[in-house]
Image: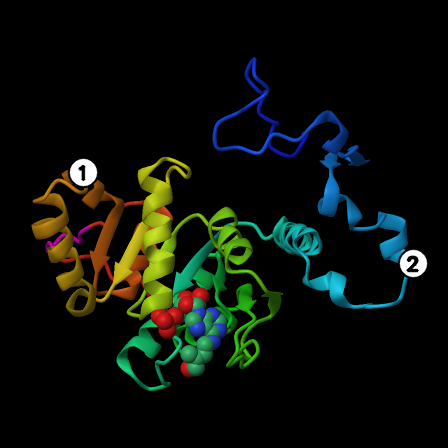
Amino acid sequence: MSISQHPIPHPDANGRVTGTHVPLPSEIAPAKHKGSLELRRKQADTGMSDQHLLDTSGAGQFIHTDPWRVLRIQSEFVEGFGALADLGPAVSVFGSARTKPGTEYYEMAVDVGRKLAEAGVAVITGGGPGSMEAANKGAVEGNGVSVGLGIELPFEQGLNQWVDLGINFRYFFARKTMFVKYAQGFVVLPGGLGTLDELFEAMVLVQTRKVTSFPIVLLGVRFWGPMLEWIRDTLVAEGMVSEKDLDLIQLVDDPADAVHRVLHGAPLPPTTNGNQQRPE
Ligand SMILES: C/C(=C\CNc1ncnc2c1ncn2[C@@H]1O[C@H](COP(=O)(O)O)[C@@H](O)[C@H]1O)CO
């Protein structure tokens, strides 16, 4: 790749270019080449790489530069891929950071985590408090693999105590890649903006076929029902999404059903009396 300054406009037969100052050949500064970059004038006065490396004046400033950030971002992907490559089958579980032990949604998340673990499936969460902690707790109680992908936040609390394999991320987008790349599907419990962000990103990835065969199961009919109605009555009705995009998500009230659907892409089979099976 080559990056250079804008090409210099050519003057007309009279030596003029309307509205533009055309430098005379004597004004055209020689280019300095730095790797794939070609730099002139002030852009060329940025010093040499080895000078930056060895010169200690202003030490520390370089870590605030974008090229340095690229290396950090790269290292987050490398560490994440390395730590999770051998995870085996896994499901990512999302939900509010604010639910408290003993509440309906917290206990639902414990149940989901435990059932996934009992099915031999690792549980991946955001590693934080609330429903994340609950799903990790369930995974440990079910004797499974409990993974937490934490994120550095201003009001950081650290990984919850039920995370057995934890990775801390600085960048949301690197962390989000791991949630999708190492999971067979998502179970999404009630939550706020963070949960909605994770849910809608997954829906877009499935809708645009960036990921295939990826069940997304919403748990909590009372909570998610109105959102699905809005999608149907407004987004579909106004042609913003197609009717079949609604098939991307399944809505259930029972953790056992959610686990079955996320693992098998289908509802729990009915029993002979017509009710859904209720596995232990
Ligand atoms: C809000 C509080 C702590 C925040 N700590 C978090 N740690 C890890 N992951 C988080 C945290 N907050 C949000 N997330 C991510 O978003 C989802 C939950 O967000 P919501 O807005 O609460 O729905 C969750 O799945 C995480 O991935 C102090 O209580």
Q: Which residues are magenta?
A: 270-274
* Residue at 55% from the left image edge and 54% from the top image edge: 174
- Taking depth in this image into account, of 79 and 161 the one nearest to the observer is 79
- Main SS, magenta residues: loop
- State which quadrant residue 274 falls in: bottom left
Residue 238 drawn in magenta: no
Mark 1 surroundings: few (<14), some (14-19) or many (≥20) residues within 10 A: few
Please state, as top left, top right, bottom left or bottom right, where the C terminus lies in the image.
Answer: bottom left
* Residue at 58% from the left image edge and 34% from the top image edge: 21
- Residue 215 drawn above or below residue 104: above
Pointer 2 residue: 54
Name the kind of residue labelled 1 in the image.
Answer: Lys
Q: Give the secondary structure at mark 1.
A: helix
Q: Give the secondary structure at mark 2.
A: helix
Task: Tell me whether the residue at label 1 lies in contact with that at label 2, contact meaning CB atoms closer than 8 angstroms.
Answer: no
Please state, as top left, top right, bottom left or bottom right, where the N terminus lies in the image.
Answer: top right
Can residue 267 be seen by looking at this rendering? no
- State which quadrant residue 195 falls in: bottom left
Q: Which sits earlier in the primary sequence, circle 1 or circle 2?
A: 2
Question: Looking at the picture, how far across and down is residue 266, in whole percent?
Answer: 26, 46
Q: Most extreme residue toward the right, as rendered?
A: 54
Residue 271 drawn in magenta: yes
Pointer 1 residue: 244
Question: Looking at the picture, how far across and down is residue 236, in whole percent?
Answer: 12, 44
